[in-house]
């Protein structure tokens, strides 16, 4: 096999977004391509991402882009177009959530040659092999190309996937962005009610996380599994393994029903093993108040922190997920001051007509049609965010937090002159709008 230095690189690009999670999807792809020269470019760390990709594109074998439905599509398209202009023959493939949702809009841009629908490891591996052999992406049956019927979404590989090669990422920049040495790790694929779920054995998970902790002097491991609690026995085995080798701080995701159904001794074991908190995503209408409060009570009793992320949709037909979310979030905050309860808007992604990539990006940014409801959402989101934001050392930020805490306790978000003043002051001081706190 030729040494990496003499092989044309496979360039993988992650558009910038508001999150701080490492590009685990691209990391999985790069780790799958054993023996290849893979370069991952993260747009969050590049002052001029187009220039960086263009520089690599001139000698690259291909460019793969992680396309997520949202404003980041504009950047994905801009960077892809710049790479194509610099290297007209460069094969460009998009993968990720948006390529799976609507591959047609990606291919219609004219700069995307193919889309990987669903899991991308085997598709990208086949594409790289074909390109090394002098073939085109159109000859790779696992990819969707313009003018042909879309492929079925590919399931995750059935073979044991390789260890994540974290040397492909600039971890120090990620640690700096987060303000701590906290590493993202994925131990399973799929969801219990969706794609076929597969999880690494608990022994491997414990061994890998401990080795990574020692190598990178980690403060915490963040499990970013789509459905971490699918196998509760595996979770318990992981916690026991963490505990036996000395507590290793970690956190993972769970569904509200997972926390509500877990036995008290299992939750206490998680806390004893070093689990600092669970992250629970609350979908509109998926969990009632009683279930959420039961979950919160059990976590509080076990000494576990929690972050309940409330997804809300625009009120319609008498359903008001925002009002319900605010009510439960206030009760959870009163139950345990460590609980975080961010509220985030879920855009309507139902396909209507044939939107372009730009149309999809605009749709995710568009405010609710009900202006009054949109104002309520903006106010509630702001005050919950400020009440749970780390104020740091600045006295002014402590005052903002105290005011926001008072509003959350009272449930009063109207007459938001203070919010407007805070946002205006941020613009005057920094020249930019106030950004949400970075969350894991």
Image: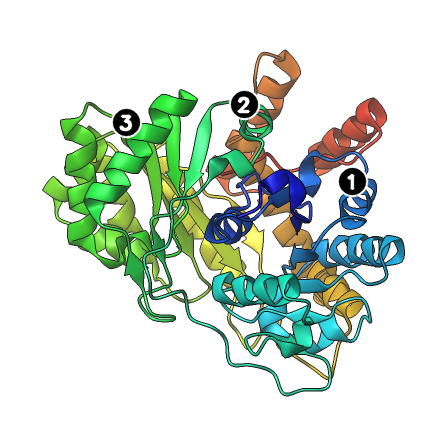
Query: Label 2: which residue?
Result: 179
Query: Label 3: which residue?
Result: 248
Res 215 label: none
Q: Most extreme residue toward the front, as rendered?
A: 1
Figure coloring: rainbow
Which marked residue is nearer to the observer: mark 2 or mark 1?
1
**In the figure, is residue 13 to the left or right of 319?**
right
Residue 197, percent from left and from top = 31, 64
- Residue 407 seen: yes
Residue 80, percent from left and from top = 78, 57
Earlier sequence position, callout 3 versus callout 1: 1
The residue carrying pointer 3 sits among few (fewer than 14), some (14 to 19) or many (20 or more) residues within 10 Å by Cα, namely many
Residue 355, percent from left and from top = 75, 76
Asked if 23 appears above or below 336 in the picture, the reply is: below
Query: Label 1: which residue?
Result: 52
Which marked residue is nearer to the observer: mark 3 or mark 1?
1
Asked if 206 appears above or below 360 in the picture, the reply is: above
Residue under the image location 17 percent in, 29 percent down: 243
- Between the residue at mark 3 and the residue at mark 1, the CA separation in whole angstroms equals 37 Å
């Amino acid at each position: 096999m030729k040494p990496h230095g003499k092989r044309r690189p496979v360039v993988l690009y992650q558009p910038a977004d508001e999150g701080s999670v490492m590009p685990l999807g691209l990391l999985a792809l790069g780790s799958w391509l054993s023996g290849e020269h893979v370069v991952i470019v993260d747009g969050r760390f590049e002052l001029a991402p187009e220039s960086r990709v263009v520089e690599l594109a001139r000698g690259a074998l291909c460019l793969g882009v992680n396309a997520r439905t949202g404003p980041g599509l504009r950047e994905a398209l801009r960077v892809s177009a710049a790479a194509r202009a610099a290297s007209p023959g460069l094969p460009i493939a998009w993968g990720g959530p948006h390529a799976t949702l609507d591959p047609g809009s990606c291919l219609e841009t004219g700069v995307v040659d193919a889309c990987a629908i669903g899991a991308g490891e085997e598709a990208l591996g086949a594409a790289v092999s074909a390109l090394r052999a002098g073939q085109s992406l159109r000859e790779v049956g696992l990819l969707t190309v313009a003018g042909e019927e879309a492929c079925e979404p590919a399931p995750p590989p059935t073979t044991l996937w390789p260890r994540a090669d974290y040397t492909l990422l600039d971890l120090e920049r990620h640690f700096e962005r987060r303000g701590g040495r906290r590493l993202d790790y994925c131990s399973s694929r799929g969801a219990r009610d969706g794609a076929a779920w597969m999880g690494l054995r608990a022994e491997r998970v414990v061994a890998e996380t401990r080795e990574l902790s020692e190598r990178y002097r980690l403060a915490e491991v963040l499990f970013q599994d789509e459905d971490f609690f699918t196998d509760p026995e595996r979770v318990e085995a992981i916690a026991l393994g963490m505990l036996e080798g000395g507590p290793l701080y970690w956190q993972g995701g769970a569904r509200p029903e997972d926390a509500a159904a877990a036995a008290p001794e299992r939750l206490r074991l998680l806390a004893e093993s070093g689990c600092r908190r669970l992250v629970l995503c609350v979908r509109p209408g998926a969990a009632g108040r009683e279930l959420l409060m039961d979950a919160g009570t059990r976590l509080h009793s076990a000494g576990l922190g929690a972050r309940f992320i409330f997804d809300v949709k625009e009120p319609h037909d008498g359903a008001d997920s925002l009002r319900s979310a605010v009510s439960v979030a206030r009760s959870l905050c009163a139950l345990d001051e460590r609980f975080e309860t961010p509220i985030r808007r879920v855009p309507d992604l139902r396909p209507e007509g044939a939107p372009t990539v730009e149309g999809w990006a605009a749709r995710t940014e568009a405010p609710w049609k009900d202006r009054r409801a949109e104002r309520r959402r903006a106010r509630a989101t702001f005050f919950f965010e400020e009440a749970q934001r780390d104020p740091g050392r600045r006295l002014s930020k402590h005052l903002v937090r105290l005011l926001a805490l008072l509003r959350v306790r009272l449930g009063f978000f109207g007459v938001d002159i203070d919010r407007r003043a805070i946002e205006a002051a941020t613009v005057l001081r920094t020249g930019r709008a106030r950004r949400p706190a970075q969350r894991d």
